[in-house]
Image: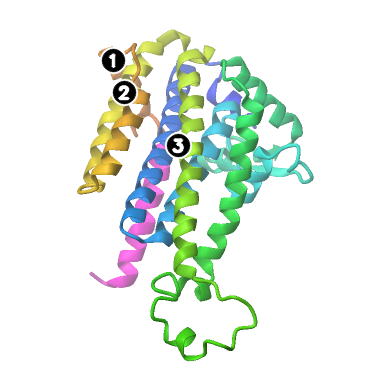
Amino acid sequence: MAKPMEYWMPRDLRQQKDRVRQRFYVACCLLMSSVQDYFLGLKEKEDKNFNWSATCSYYSMVHTARLICFLAHGDFAKGHKDMADFLRQPEGCGARLSRNWLHGFSGGTVKSGKLEREDHDVLLTFFEGLGIRDVRGKLKSFAELFDSGRDLRNSSNYEALLIAHEYRHHDGSPFEARYPHEHHCPPVDLTIEFGKLADCMSEAAKKGMTLGIEAFVAFMDCDPSLDRERDALRGFFWDFVVTRVKEAMVHKLRGESSCIAELEKVVDRLRTSRGIGSDFGHVERSINQKVFDRKHGLMSEFKRKVDRLEETLHPGQ
């Protein structure tokens, strides 16, 4: 079985052209998912849906973590804890961590493997080679935020005793007012804590998104595998940003002027000074579902699951 980078850079030159473009496209999707979830978290926070704001922000960090690992290794761990532990190396190097996304995506062509300390060193070397300064410090800071966010997301999403008290926990609470002197310790106002959670998760996601943008732009501008058609890929990326991110997010953020203003700033940071206007039709051909069969398989499986749910709801229709 092939190793991840052997899958993305096969010896057959014709196949290699398609795979290089497809790898670039997967990285685009991971970055855009991080950006979109960050802004959805902002919108939910504005609407005071603090728990879901924190959840969106957390998943922005998940996509950033996956992007960073994918750029360096061509694969990543699907498990959130494995991903956090890998990025926290050497603190998280006590266990052998699974690298398993590409195995499923490739239809078993690539064998699942392990992410170990040596792989973390490879990751640092990869980004240092792209010219990113203080990679170790930036990665360590993000990994700690991601790990803390992972633990909080588990509490805020799965513990009903917390979720049920997100709104007006103390403000006029009949329970607390009825028994004011029976506390053995100062009561906790969960409404305030959920608000703090949303603020902190949003800030952490923004730091992660900033790192993800820096990593992707360095990859787009400097990675040797893209040398043959860098301007075409830049042109494709900019079209992708405008049509798949900016237009979609302006629609989703409608009415949230402060969020849209920040979105415009992020889009400006993604604007590439070169490649805009370049012909990228051959890039689009490589990621078309007829050519990119693994993408087609993923989307077809998603459709089958949606159809199954619809059939369960409305049997026989």
Query: What are the residue bounds of the magenta stretch?
Result: 294-317
Tag 2's secondary structure? helix
**Which residue is at a point 54% across and 28% down the rendered structure image?**
71
In the displayed structure, 195 sits above or below 118; it is below
**Which residue is at a point 31% across and 23% down the rendered structure image?**
238
Asked if disc 2 and disc 3 are in contact, CB closer than 8 Å, the reply is no
* Residue 106 appears in the picture as rendered: no
Q: Is residue 306 magenta?
A: yes
In the displayed structure, 171 sits above or below 81; it is below
Tag 3's secondary structure? helix
Tag 1's secondary structure? loop
State how far apart marks 1 and 3 are (Cα): 21 Å
Provide the residue designation for mark 2: 238
In the displayed structure, 206 sits above or below 278; it is below
Label 1: few (<14), some (14–19) or many (≥20) C-alpha neighbours in 10 Å: some
Outermost residue toward the front in this view:
181
Q: Which numbered disc, 2 or 3, marks the residue that appears first in the sequence?
A: 3
What is the quadrant of residue 282 in the picture?
Answer: top left
Q: Is residue 75 magenta?
A: no
Residue 271, image x, y percentages:
33, 21
Quarter of the figure that contains the C terminus = bottom left
Residue 172, image x, y percentages:
38, 81
In the displayed structure, 71 sits above or below 58; it is above
Three-letter code for the amino acid on which mark 1 is drawn: Ile
Provide the residue designation for mark 1: 276
Three-letter code for the amino acid on which mark 2 is drawn: Trp
Asked if disc 1 and disc 3 are in contact, CB closer than 8 Å, the reply is no
Provide the residue designation for mark 3: 30
Asked if disc 1 and disc 2 are in contact, CB closer than 8 Å, the reply is yes
State how far apart marks 1 and 2 are (Cα): 7 Å
**Which residue is at a point 75% across and 29% down the rendered structure image?**
118
57 sits to left or right of 259 = right
